[in-house]
Image (cartoon, coloured by chain):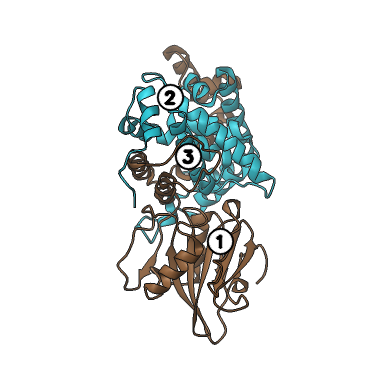
Amino acid sequence: MGAGMLDQYLDGLLTEGDRAAFERGLSRDPALAGAIACQRRIDASLERLFVPADLDRVAAQLATAIVASPMPIAEPRRAVRPRTFAIAAGIALFVVVGVQVWTETGRRPIDPYAPQPWRSLSQVYEDTVDAGFRPQWVCKDDREFETTFRRRFGQSLAMLPPPPGIAWAGIDYCNSITPATTTVLAHVYGREVLLFVDRASGDKEASVAAGSGLNLFQKRLGGLVVYEYTPHDRAYMVDLLYVPGLAGP
Amino acid sequence: MIRQAANPGVEAKLRAASTSAAEFAAQFQASFRVLWLIAIGIVGESALAEDVVQEAAIIALGKLDQYRAGTNFTAWTGQIVRNVALNRARRERRHRPLTIELVRLDEGAGVGGGAALPKERIEFDERVVRALGSVGDVARACLLLRTLEGMEYSQISQVLGIPEGTAMSHVHRTRAYLRERLADLWKERSEADGSFGD
């Protein structure tokens, strides 16, 4: 029996008579029987690997975002991402890649997948400071920090233990570089510093607001871009981040 | 926060397409699994697949006046997803090699209460992923649509905009290639543990 017959069998395209004959022949052809069993195992792997458990929920959230969308839709090429719909859809779709384990830190928890309005880096910095510079979540350990970025952006991100005078505070979410921007809060020598992390492919070359007294530093880490928004005149935090397995800190 | 105010441009296109935003959303939701499989099949990475489906939704809304109510919505949006995904994969590959990324259901073990997979199955899964990395983008999408969604070759042909025979050929050749790449491990495991080859 040839490969064509095997594929027709796997596709369920054989007639009842041909199928019965094919299956009778399997007992005399262990190689063919093994091929079918191997194929079944491969198919089971595909099912396990490529169908996120939360797909229906994501689809429902996306549908809700479409109905509510006020986005201008005539020129998708000019600015595809910064749309209210894109925000909603993008954040909703994050459910696909991640179950995240975070510890609440006292602020009223937000849904990290909920749509947010676009804000500039400066605005996010001001808002975060005005709100007491408290993160939404604090990772339980370094591994969760890494896993969060891997699931969110497809690439891990790790952090070194900070030197005295510098402390990681936690993580928040915003819509700035893309709707998926993740911020890392830190205290650096008594001042609030914010890191904005996103996919490098979505980078729009952010700038600092004139006259703000703040500085902006950018660094590429593999497929990610990290901006350090800081009142200091040098970057302290970005060099504490590294991509595991890609480059040493 | 999502504002509820309607956009005149959207409304005009919805009228031209004889559909409503709610109908569009409902159809998009119904097609979502297929669209997701096309995207992940072509770009390979779940994060990129998210972007692709999102961007395709925006484009589909922008072109809604080209859609005729009652025709195959999944095929219409599927081809948009395919084009966006192929463009995105090309663009990304200029900067880095794309890899096939697992969307493991067992990653939530310990978080959502799921049980971790046996080590042997994880190893097998990883070998499947590595083998899939050597398969063409569209062939991979064909295989996923056929295997995971049970789509007929004529349906795959419609959503990917390729001839039916090509869709079938992609699936058959990719299956054979995967079996060839996995045969040694499958044989080893099934001999060591009879339940593995079930």
Q: Foreground residue, B62 or A3?
A: B62
Q: Chain of mark 3?
A: B
Q: Chain of mark 2?
A: B
Amino acid at dot 1 = Ser
Determine the residue located farthest toward the bottom in the rendered image.
A164
Image height of A198 relative to B67, above or below: below
Image point (56%, 22%), residue name: B168
Tag 1–tag 2 contact (CB < 8 Å): no
Q: Chain of mark 1?
A: A
Image point (42%, 14%), residue name: A16
In this rendering, position of residue B4 left or right of residue B178? left
Residue named by callout 3: B53
Amino acid at dot 3 = Val
Image height of A77 relative to A100, above or below: above
User: Secondary structure beneath disc 2?
Assistant: helix
Image point (44%, 60%), residue name: A174
Q: Residues within 10 Å of mark 3 (few under 14, many from 20)?
A: many
Image height of B108 relative to A133, above or below: above
Image point (51%, 36%), residue name: A75
Q: Colour of chain A?
A: brown
**Label ID, residue B65:** 2
Report the mark closest to the observer, 1 or 3.
Answer: 3
Q: Earlier in the sequence, mark 2 or mark 3?
A: 3
Q: Is residue B24 visible?
A: yes
Q: Foreground residue, A142 or A225?
A: A225
Q: Foreground residue, A110 or B163?
A: A110
**Label ID, residue A117:** none
User: Secondary structure beneath disc 1?
Assistant: loop
**Label ID, residue A156:** 1
Report the mark closest to the observer, 1 or 2.
Answer: 2
